[in-house]
Every structure is written in C-alpha cells, then in structure tokens.
Amino acid sequence: MTSIRRWLLGWLIFGMAAASGMAGYGIFHTAREEASELFDYELRTVALSLPSNLSGAGDGEHRPPDLGDLADDRIVIEIWDRAGTMIYHSMQAPVFMRLPAGFNTVERGEYHWRTFGVAQPARYIQVAQPVSVREDLALRLALHTLWPLAVLVPVTIVLVLLVVARGLAPIGGLSRAVSTRSIDSLEPLHLDGAVPVEMKPLVDALNDLLQRLHTASQAQRTFIADAAHELRSPLAALKLQLQAASRDGSLKGEGQTLERLEGRVNRIIHLVQQLLTLAREDAQPVTSRAPVSLRRIGEQAVGDCSLLAEAKEIDLGLECEGARSATDPYTVLAEPHGMSVLLANLINNAIRHTPRGGRVDVILKRAGERVGLDVLDSGTGIPEAELERVFDRFYRGEEAQGEGSGLGLAIVSRIAGRHQLGLSLRNNQGRPGLCVAVSGLPAHEGEIATSARR
C-alpha cells in the first residue's frame, strides 16, 4: 500500500541529501583550489619579504629570518647572488637547483615541491614548499568550510519531518473523524480549524455522500414506519370482526380452523408492532440519556406482560440482587423509552418461548458503579450454534417454540448497541432455559454520591 507520508519524506530527504552532496562536493573542491592559490600567494609573499641583508653559507650557522608561522619546515628558502653562487639556504632542507622565475612544480626524491622564484637586482630568491603539506592544509581548510553544511542537513531533515507531519495532520483528523463515528451518524463532517484547499473537495464529496445516505436511510425508515402503521389498524379491525363474527355465529367453521385463523392474525399484528418498534428505534440514532429508575421500568414491564404470563400459567417475577436498600431504585443513566422497549421485548420473548407452567425471572444486578439485568426462563434454550445468529432480523431457530417474528432480540440488540451496553446469551447450566444478560448501564452519579455519604 502506497503511503503519501513515506513517499514525501523519501523523495524530500533523498533530494535534499543529493543536493547537499553536490553542494558539498562543489564547496570542497572550490575551497581546495582557493587554498592552493592562497599558498601560492604565501610563497610569493615570503620571497618578496625576505630582508636584503639575509646571507650565509649553507652550513646552518646563520640566523633564519623571522617570518612567523611561515618560516618553518613548510618553507625552503634559497638565495643566489648575481654570480650564481648560493649565499643562503634553509636549515635541514634539501638543496634545489635554480629554476626559472615564477611558479614551478618539481619532483625531489619521493616528494613533489611547489616553487616560486623571483630575480632581484643583486640576487635571485627561490622559495619551495612540499605539495603534500599544501594538500594537507588545503584539505583541512576545505573540511572546515563543510561543517555548516553538516549541521544544516540533520536540521533540515528534522524540519522536513515536522513540516510533512503538520501538513498531513488534516488527513489524520479527517480519518479520526470518520473512524470514530457511529454507524448511525450521518451528519456532515465538521473538522476542527480551517480545512486545507486541497482537502475541501474530499470533505465536500464525503458530506454529499453522507447526505445521500441519510436521505436513503430516512426514506427506508419512513417507509417501514408508514407501512407498519398502515397495516396495524386494518389488522386490528380484522381481528375484532373475526371475534364478533365468531360470537354471533355468522362465521361458520371448525373450532380449530377459527383458532388457527385468529392465531395467524395475532402473529401478523405482533409482527407489525415489532416492525413499527424497530423503525422507531432505527430513527433514533442519538441517545439522550437521563436518570431513570431501572427498578420502576422492570416493575412496569413485568406488569404489562403479566396477562400474557397468566395465560400460559408462567411464574413471572422481579428480583433485586446487591440492592443498597429495600427501596433501591437502581437509578441509571439511560434513555427511558429505549430501556422500556428493551426489557419488554426480553420478557415477551422469554414468555413466548417458555412452555406452559414454566418460570421467567427478571433479576436486577449491581457491579460497582455499573448496573445490569438478567432475564432467565425455563424454556428449551437455544442450540450453541445458533447463539450468534438470534440477533439477526427475522431469524428464528429450527427448534423455536411459540409465536414470534424474529425481531424481538434484533430490537434488543439495536437498543443495547445505541446505549453501548454488553449483551450476551447463554443456556442455563444444569437446568433448561436461557439467560439473556445486559450489562454496562452507568449508575447515576447523584445516587453514587448519596451512597458514599451513607
């Protein structure tokens, strides 16, 4: 996969290193050439600045001229008189033959020498210097000119890294803004700070796509809600007409036929109600949480489902574990309507899949600052292979008992996901039935503070 960051950094650093190398090569050779010219100038200056009374035999018994740093082993001085006799020669230095005036390069033994000769009225002066000494000094001077470049290169690399990171930061911000969004959030993207001109077409295209997805999703939800709403009224009327016709004798048929017909109508009515509930839950992507008593919601849900439980002779009850007091309300931060729908669907689903004479228990639990609930039944349970699929819409297992539309647990999963709750199913150990556990509801802070003072 191609990385814009690596591509930019690679080419910028490579280009800068190549340019720095070529610049360093040019600076180095220019400095060496200028240093060579400087040493030639040094030789000429030495030759022209020698005192006129400098003389002596070449036996080293004379006093050398005071030339500072120049008159050391780097410089060889030779002087001839008008008759061509050598009248001065540097101590411990090789003797050169008299060379033509000006600059010359000669070989003496294993070394090369750079010489400069100048003719004066009463004498001829020749100054020589080893080429190796000149090259060493020139190399040292050239290297001294490169240290600013050696400092500049790493500083520039660090600057390139910072600039590239800062320049690509808006892309990272856009990526985080998209990745942290929930599946239901289709609002336009709003990045912090000004959007770069290069990214504006991408942001506009994403916002246009989100707007089209929002329109399509809203149209789908509206269709489901309208269809469910329009179907609910005529189905309820049909059920009433069937009941009225059965009572007054105008509807003729066997008892089992009428019972099956009424059961089919009830199932269709339940399906429409579930579709309407699911459409309403899908139309609420943003959860507005408020302090709500989970115990009160549980009591209300148990009361609403009590008639259905009595019809099947099912023992339905509410239990509280870990209660802080006898009247502990189990206050949590949640969306009241959503929690009511969640608990009602769990209880309704448990009753429908529990055989006559069974048991359904709703248990409220505390775990530190979190509150959860379990719904246990004594039904047949769910095969382990189907536990992961029962949350799919319209899915009913092969061994499912009772009436149902396959939407109850899908609605529960939708509400739990919107509240960011943990939802799990497991078969009861050692006895028949299923346990649906909901966990992660945050306890209300005011309730926590009151408990801490107690």
Image (tube, helix red, strand yellow):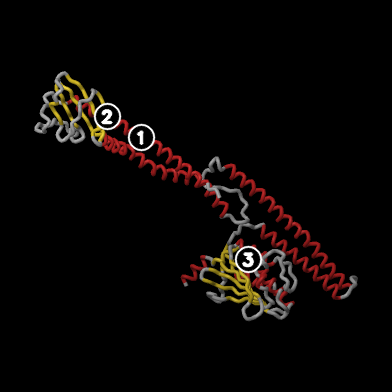
Which numbered marker is on residue 27?
1
For the point 60% across and 48% down, the residue is 188
Circle 3 Cα neighbour tier, 10 Å, few/some/many (<14 / 14–19 / ≥20): many
What amino acid type is highlighted by mark number 2?
A: Thr
Nearer the camera: disc 2 or disc 1 = 2
**Where on the picture, by quarter, is residue 78?**
top left
Nearest to the observer: residue 287 or residue 179: 179
Q: Is residue 376 left or right of residue 45?
A: right
Q: Which residue is mark 2?
A: 105
Nearest to the observer: residue 399 or residue 291: 399
For the point 29% across and 29% down, the residue is 37
- SS for callout 3: helix
- SS for callout 1: helix
In whole angstroms, how far apart are the C-alphas of marks 2 and 3? 101 Å
For the point 41% across and 42% down, the residue is 156
Q: Which residue is mark 3?
A: 339
Which numbered marker is on residue 216?
none
In whole angstroms, how far apart are the C-alphas of marks 3 and 1? 77 Å
